[in-house]
Image (tube, helix red, strand yellow):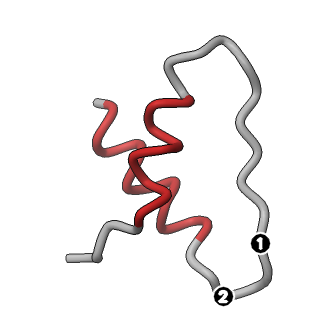
Amino acid sequence: MFKKREIFSVIKKHLEWEEITLIAGARQVGRTTLMKQLQTEMK
């Protein structure tokens, strides 16, 4: 189980808009994990 970050709810809310959402960051900061969590939540 992964801990949800503060940004999770912000990104999830932004995905409701018809705009591109860019998730950027340094290596090893959890971008892929965040995307997997969002995919699971949105199903």
Looking at the rendering, which quadrant does residue 27 occupy? bottom right
Mark 1 and mark 2 in contact (Cβ < 8 Å)?
no
Residue under the point 49% across and 58% down: 7
26 sits to left or right of 42: right
Looking at the rendering, which quadrant does residue 14 occupy? top right
Foreground: disc 2 or disc 1: 1
Q: Quadrant of the C terminus?
A: top left
29 sits to left or right of 3: right
Residue under the point 41% across and 42% down: 39
In the figure, 41 relative to 6: above or below?
above
Badge 2 marks a residue whose secondary structure is: loop
In the figure, 6 relative to 17: above or below?
below
Badge 1 marks a residue whose secondary structure is: loop
Looking at the rendering, which quadrant does residue 31 occupy? bottom right
Residue under the point 28% across and 41% down: 41
- Amino acid carrying label 2: it is Gln
Residue placed under numbered mark 1 in the picture: 25
Residue 19 in the image: x percent, y percent? 73, 19
Residue 20 in the image: x percent, y percent? 76, 27
- Amino acid carrying label 1: it is Gly
Residue placed under numbered mark 2 in the picture: 28
In the figure, 2 relative to 33: above or below?
below
43 sits to left or right of 30: left
15 sits to left or right of 24: left
Mark 2 neighbour density, 10 Å: few (under 14) some (14–19) many (20 or more): few
Residue 9 has which mark? none
